[in-house]
Amino acid sequence: MGQHIDKATIVNRALVRIGQAPSFSLDDENFANGSIDGIWPDCVARCFSLHDWTFARRTRRLTRVAGENESGWPYAFDLPGDRLGPPLKILRAVFPQDAVIRDYAIEGNQLYASEPEVWARCKVDVDPAAWDAAFRSAFITALAARLAVPMQQDEGLASELEAMAFGSPAQGGTGGEFGRLIAQDRAAGPISSPLLRNDPLTEARYS
């Protein structure tokens, strides 16, 4: 049986990458842990924002808000509270064929539409235990880069690890370990799937 993976496991592996003792604990409140807790959410936000990672996608039927709303739309729906960023796709059905809704509005945590039933495909906050193993490895490199300066004042190591994780600044985060993962994730997608044919240009390619 494999080791349980949680935030502490990942942080300690990142600490080892920069030559530090794996001393992080979820229950400890020392100064170093406080600094790490401040860095963690920013690193998560950056790494998840790079791409619509398949392991973090979820398609859910939205809960319709009862009663009238002041938006001017016939129906209002609550968006998932654990989503990361805006929905990837808004649908009126998920089977037998995805039907994309283009006419809708989002304000705050609610979505407004003319459809009485709506599904949303979102990128969601995923527990580290459910992260893809290759993503987790790249994330550890990225986290180690963020920890190198506050933990041991090593800007050279920080730059080296940053390049390993994301590539050169000119690549804008699409190089390095994450760049390879993004390419693999895209290549694994069903290119001819009707799901991807939801705009005129893509539709024309397959017609």
Image (cartoon, rainbow, N blue to C red):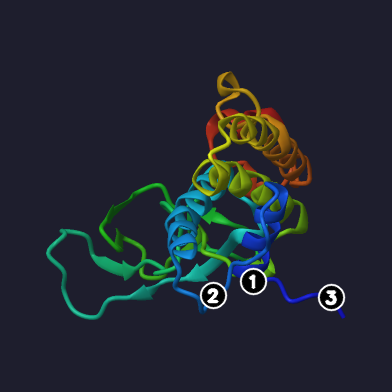
Contact, CB < 8 Å: mark 2 with mark 1? yes
Residue reaching furthest to the right? 1
Provide the residue designation for mark 1: 6
Provide the residue designation for mark 3: 2
Provide the residue designation for mark 2: 26
- How crowded pointer 2 is (Cα within 10 Å; few <14, some 14-19, many 20+) is rated as few
Query: Could you tell me which residue is drawn at 44 percent across and 57 percent down?
Result: 35
Q: Is residue 184 left or right of residue 114?
A: right
**The residue under label 3 is which amino acid type?**
Gly
Above or below, 198 against 76 in this view is above
Query: Could you tell me which residue is drawn at 50 percent across and 56 percent down?
Result: 40
Q: Nearer the viewer, mark 2 or mark 3?
A: 2
Query: Could you tell me which residue is drawn at 59 percent across and 67 percent down?
Result: 24
Front one among 26 and 164: 26
Front one among 137 and 96: 137
Name the secondary structure under disc 2: loop
Name the secondary structure under disc 3: loop
Name the secondary structure under disc 1: loop
